[in-house]
Image (cartoon, rainbow, N blue to C red):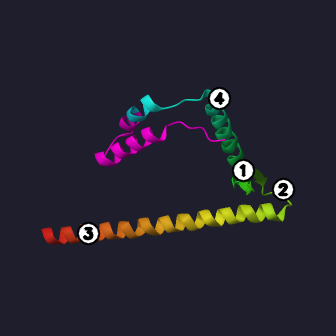
Amino acid sequence: MKSKTLEKRARDVIVSTIMESGEMGIEEIMDLIRPHYLFDPSAAKEQAIRRKAHQLAAQIRDDKGIRMVFACKEGNTSKYVNTDTSENVDDLRGVEEQLNAKLIGLYASKSKVSARRTEVEGQIRLDLARMV
């Protein structure tokens, strides 16, 4: 169940304003959204409860501090799997695949940042060499 918090036209105008500005603080963006925001208390409460449920499940650890419970997709719904006690091979495989996908994404991001850091460090060295 998706709740609509901004009309498409308002969203488009706000995104356009952000893109045109080049630089904008979060408070300024909030000020753009505020007059157009459609608030549904019931949907907000359900969203907060869902977020709290996820946080609680993600905090469950074993005695060594290693996370035990992970979300796993089953069709269009999520369920939580306790990897220490589950005997469902498909669930365990699903959790493992999700963790592998996250690792691949993290490694790609790390590689990108490392390459950029190396590039910037090289530029700094070149600038320092020119100054001498």
Query: Which residues fall within the magenta stretch?
Result: 1-30
Disc 2 packing (10 Å; few <14; some 14–19; many ≥20) = few
Mark 4 is on which residue type?
Ser
Disc 4 packing (10 Å; few <14; some 14–19; many ≥20) = few
Above-or-below relation of 125 to 57: below
- Looking at the rendered image, the quarter that the C terminus falls into is bottom left
Task: Tell me the SS state at disc 4.
Answer: helix
| Left or right: where 13 falls relative to 67 | left
Mark seen at residue 123: 3
Mark 3 is on which residue type?
Gln
Q: Nearer the viewer, mark 3 or mark 1?
A: 3
Q: Are marks 2 and 4 in contact (CB under 8 Å)?
A: no
Above-or-below relation of 3 to 92: above
Which residue is nearer to you in this view: 66 or 109? 109
- Looking at the rendered image, the quarter that the N terminus falls into is top right
Q: Earlier in the sequence, mark 3 or mark 1?
A: 1
Q: Earlier in the sequence, mark 3 or mark 2?
A: 2
